Image (cartoon, rainbow, N blue to C red):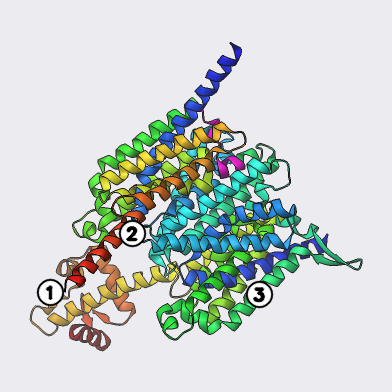
Amino acid sequence: MENLSILTHLDYTLMIVAIGAALLGAVSGALGSYAVLRRQSLLGDAISHAALPGIAIAFLLTGSKTPLILVLGAAIAGWLGTLLILSIVRLTRIKYDSALGIVLSTFFGFGLVLHTLIQRTGNANQAGLDTFLFGQAATLLERDVLTIGILGGIALTVMLIFWKELKLLVFDEGFAASIGFPIRTLDILLTSLLVVAIVLGLQAVGAVLMSAMLVAPAVAARQWTDRLRLMVFLAACFGALAGVSGTIISSTASRIPTGPTIVLCATVVVGFSIVFAPNRGLVWDRIRQQRNRRNLKMETSRY
Amino acid sequence: MLEGHLDILLIAIVTAVACALLGVFLVLRRMTLMSDAISHAILPGIVLAFFLTHSLSSPLLILAAAGTGVLTVVCVELLERTKLVKEDAAIGLTFPALFSIGVILISRFAGNVHLDMDAVLLGELAYAPLNRLKAFGYDLGPVSLYVMGTILVLNLVFICLFYKELKLATFDASLAAALGLAPTVIHYGLMTLVSVTTVGAFDAVGSILVVALIAGPPATAYLMTDRLSRMLILSAIIGSVNAVSGYGVAFLFDVSIAGSIATMTLLIFVLVFLVVPNRGLIAIARRHARQKWEFAQTMLVIHLFNHEGLPEAETESAIADLHEHLSWDPGFTSQVVRYALNNRCVSRKETQLILTAHGRTIAQQALVQ
């Protein structure tokens, strides 16, 4: 009887974590589609690293470890980092990749400096930084899942409200500007949505792996369709699938961290899609090539 | 104690210069993020080599990591070649996957051995001088200084030997290929060196901040010059300045050395971004302001020139009514008039504004254009 209660309790924790991971995967998959289509796949990596000083400053200012306050700090820092990247690219001849690299690493370095300051005051333990880097999906509580659900839901709703505008921004920025859409505002809106998704994901998968949560489901979804609507939907599904399967796999054995397992699951989905997706996939491509070759041979042998 | 500082400073400078020199080519070839990818993706290589050798200082570690680094580059390029994935997404897929494998390997099998994730990711420069090279009973200095020194020499030799090839492959890859200079070989040579340098720099700054050393100084130098040779020298100097000032700050406030070097990298980049002549933010803002006033002044002299000598000239050039004729804001108009007076394009004649010879030339030139 006692065993049974432990079992149901474990299952309950696992269920909470799985729901959280699924929600996260769905939100980051859907929003990541835009980043991938705009060739800004690595922006997520930059934002998630740039968030560290924000978390540290939020803690230094308020002295509290309330998730919401830290999330707010992370969001502000990530957002500032993105603005810096955009203005470096706009105002200098430095290219996007270098601007990303500089902001990513130096913001993170500054966060590290602040972190050593905090450590010296003895207010926090090393665990804080580890969680930031690798996440601790296993510690997701009902409260956290609720936060992910609400904030992620808001982000997705905003995405749906501005569907047409964002679609135009992604596929034909020049045309959007020419018919009077406020391009820069839309750009900042889209970035802000990404920031929300990333900051929500930090606790579960951590800064280093967050970029994969944005990129992998979107790349996988891209292989199956040419329509944005379907791609965003599929990416959300793939993200959720990776979240749930990663959580379950990592729970089957001890000492398999959840975040990296989720990322590997998402990578497997990508691999499968690249190989087997109809039309674009490698297998399909090979078959088509052979059919063409055969047809060509038949055509030429006729003469 | 002083010697310890000197050791740390030397290691920091050598590491910074080694990274900055390679970084120049990465920044120019738009491949900065490849260094980010490599620095994360070599984790499984390090872990596997560590399982084999049970030592963190074995040279096999560097070889294994360099191999994994090149493997990362190959993976990214294979993904790209399928034409199903763009370059940025290919990078964003490859390195988290490899990094995840590394993390899982560590937490699954290396729980009890000493392989600290923080040490790999963040590094700790303060401990670098503790591991010393000893021979015949003499203390020859810290091991990492020798490792990074060798890597720096390797990088220098590579750049000096293949300077022409690197330059051409960077700025015009197809011409380089047409001339038979094998840009692919150069590319993989560069990527191998980036991997080796990244592993070497682990000890000092860890994998995330390597990117600051690789991207920061070259990008700062890129703002200051148009010549490749000068960019290389400048970025080596900036790298050293970042390292020294970063160490100073870390010592003053007793904080993470690598973190302060990265912070100084950002500060110096932003400083140069603001003040560098011609391309800096301040220079751009001043140029815009000057263009605004010059354009307004040209409009003013053209207006005066159009009505000069005609019957309506007296009303058209009355200072008090100018803003109505030009449909400008009165305040702005008086500022423009003052600007033009200062430049001796116009002069005041009682209540009117008349053109000087200089102002007339400006107006004529503007109208001809």
Tag 1's secondary structure? helix
Location of residue B365 in the rendering, given as x and y in whole percent from the top left corner: 22, 86
Q: Are marks 1 and 3 in contact (CB under 8 Å)?
A: no
> What residue sits 66% from the left and 66% below the top?
B15
Say which residue appears at 20% left-offset and 71% top-offset: A301
Residue at the disc numbered 2 = A286
Task: Give me the residue at 39% from left, 56% from top.
Answer: A40
Q: Is residue B146 left or right of residue B92?
A: right
Q: Secondary structure at mark 2?
A: helix
Image quarter where the N terminus of chain B lies is: bottom right
Q: Nearer the viewer, mark 3 or mark 2?
A: 2
Vertical placement of B255 versus A123: above or below?
A: below
Name the residue at 48% across, 64% down.
A98
Q: Are marks 1 and 2 on the same chain?
A: no
Seen in the picture, residue A265 relative to A294 is either above or below; the reply is: above
Marked residue chain, label 1: B
Amino acid at circle 2: Arg
Q: Earlier in the sequence, mark 1 or mark 3?
A: 3
Q: Which residues are magenta?
A: A129-141
Reply yes or no: does residue B66 show up in magenta.
no
Read off the residue under disc 3.
B154
Q: Residues within 10 Å of mark 2 (few under 14, many from 20)?
A: few
**Residue A281 visible in image:** no
Alpha carbon of mark 1 to alpha carbon of mark 2: how far?
Answer: 82 Å
- In which chain is the residue bearing label 2? A
Residue at far front of view: A302
* Discs 3, 2 touching: Cβ within 8 Å: no
- The x, y position of residue A134, in whole percent, is 56, 43
